[in-house]
Structures are given as structure tokens and as C-alpha cells.
Amino acid sequence: MVVSNHHLIAQGIKRAFKTDDGTELVALSDFDFEVKQGEVVALIGPSGCGKSTFLRLVAGLDTPQSGELTYNGSPITGPDPNRGFVFQQANLYPWLTVEKNVAFGLKANGTYKENRHRVQEMIDLMGLAGFEKSYPHQISGGMAARVAIAQTLVMDPDVLLLDEPLSALDAFTRAVIQDEILAMCVKFKPIVLLVTHDIEEAVYLADRVVVLSPRPGTKVAEIPVDLPHPRDRISSEFIAKRHEILDALRFE
Ligand SMILES: Nc1ncnc2c1ncn2[C@@H]1O[C@H](COP(=O)(O)OP(=O)(O)OP(=O)(O)O)[C@@H](O)[C@H]1O
């Protein structure tokens, strides 16, 4: 990754979908957002408020009806390996080993030869060493989540879009992978957008938490988390941040 000031700006984003009965379902409306290189931002909000929709827009997998979405000053018009997406369900290739799953994107875009060293680097970074030759059915859910993250990181993305990648894991595994994500952030300084329902996870990882309203989702609060790493989950400051976010999530 070339170090420069990557930045992503969303202004007045609206994304609506046609429902089966022909009515319009507005997922996101008037959504403004800004993030710059090296920042980890968590998106939190009620189910269905458009968090995944926003990540898909940033990934270039979808387009807004109105508003502007730019990356480094240029409109996002389609997917780009510079903006890597990690889905909730690790979609690994069952017929490929861990190592080959991680290498897949590099092989697909013809850059494996010059980047093959990155495969082992990401395997080591995500705590997968020793499992290189295992197949997806031979590894745990936590390992599969790590492979999915490594698969994306190997492409050297400037923007990492994490859509609840740890939500299906037990608390212990989640905590370990959260530390691996933090180590990756220190090393590569990407922009990270993390969709999560886990307030503790947001406070543990994020520099800033963006709270969205119920659908149509729009930003209702932006809460900086200016606590030094490693964060102590039982410190009074940490707990105070959790309360601040919980308060922002009270919509009645
Ligand atoms: N392709 C689609 N077609 C129709 N409706 C859609 C489509 N994608 C999303 N929606 C609707 O848009 C709304 C927002 O969905 P989205 O998945 O972005 O919410 P979310 O905030 O990520 O929810 P959750 O927290 O439950 O994952 C939902 O009501 C969803 O049903």
C-alpha cells in the first residue's frame, strides 16, 4: 500500500429498493459520512437501517439513487480490489486449501508471482500458521473468519469493509481476532469500516462510532473513541463509551 491520504466521502446518500408490492423501501436517506486513511470507523444502528447497504455502495457493488460517494475525489463506479469486502459468512472455496484460498485473488488478477510472499505474511498475521494445507471443512469457524480476512488483506486494500465478520463467533475467539485486526491496522493503516451490532467490539476497535437511525438510516450521532490501545474493556472510560453509544441508540 502506498502511504498517502486516502479518503472516502459520502454526501446525501439515498438508496431505496422496490418491494414486491411495488412500494419503495428507503434503506438509507441523507446519509453523510467521511473517513480518512488510518481510521477505523464502526457503523452501528438498528437492524435494517442500511449499514450493509452502505458498505455495498462503498464496495461499488451497488449505486445510490442520489448523493455523492467519492474515493480520493473520484466517484465510486464499481468494485475495485483497493476496497476489500469481508462478509458475515466466510465464503471460502471448499476445494482449496487455506493457503490457496488466501492466494485466490492474486491468482485471479495475475499478480500472484510478484506477491506470493504476501500469502504467508497474511497467514501469519491472522494466526493461521500451521493450517496452510487444511481445507475449509477441517477448520473452525474462527479460522474460517481469519481466512476470509486474510483473503481480502492479501490484495493490499486501502479500504477494508467488514460486515459483521465476527458475529457468529464465540466471545473468546472474537476477542483474539479483534486483536489480530488491530495489529493489521497498525501495520497497514487502511481505512476500516466495520458494521457490527456489538457495542463492545465497536469501542474496542474503532476510532469513531457512527450511529444510524432506524430505517431510513441516517447519521444520528458520531462518537469519537479516543482511548489508547490496548483498550481495557472493564475500565470506567471504556464502560462510559459503551453507555454513550447505548444512549445514542435509544430512539423511542
Ligand atoms: N437488494 C435488495 N432488495 C430489496 N431490499 C433490500 C435489498 N438490500 C437491502 N434491502 C433492504 O434494505 C434495508 C436495509 O438493509 P441492510 O442489509 O443494509 O440493513 P442492515 O442495517 O445492514 O441490517 P442488519 O443489521 O440486520 O444486517 C432492509 O430493510 C433490507 O430488507
Image (tube, grey):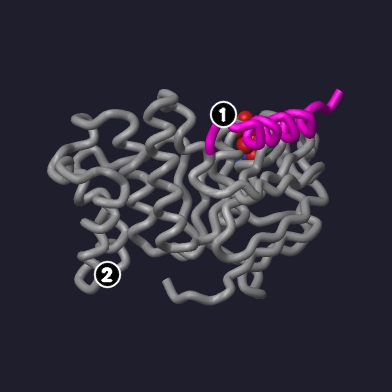
Residue 217 left/right relative to 205: right
* 162 up-or-down from 57: above or below: above
Q: Earlier in the sequence, mark 1 or mark 2?
A: 2
Task: Give the residue at x 66% y 75%.
Answer: 73
Q: Which mark is residue 234?
A: 1
**Callout 2 amino acid:** Gly
Residue 17 position within the rendered picture, expressed as x and y whole percent measured from the top left:
71, 41
Crowdedness of circle 1 by 10 Å Cα count: few (<14), some, many (20+)? few
SS type, badge 2: loop
In the orientation shown, which residue stands out farthest toward the right? 252
Residue 100 position within the rendered picture, expressed as x and y whole percent measured from the top left:
20, 51
Residue 152 position within the rendered picture, expressed as x and y whole percent measured from the top left:
38, 54
Res 45 seen here? no
- Quadrant for residue 115, please give it: bottom left
**Callout 1 amino acid:** Ile
Judging depth in this view, the residue of 154 and 130 nearest the camera is 130
Residue 112 located within the stretch drawn in magenta: no
- Quadrant for residue 195, please give it: top right
Q: Which residue is mark 2?
A: 110
Residue 235 left/right relative to 246: left
SS type, badge 1: loop
Q: Which residues are magenta?
A: 232-252
How many numbered circles are shown? 2
Q: Quadrant of the N terminus?
A: bottom left
Crowdedness of circle 2 by 10 Å Cα count: few (<14), some, many (20+)? few
Q: Which mark is residue 6?
A: none
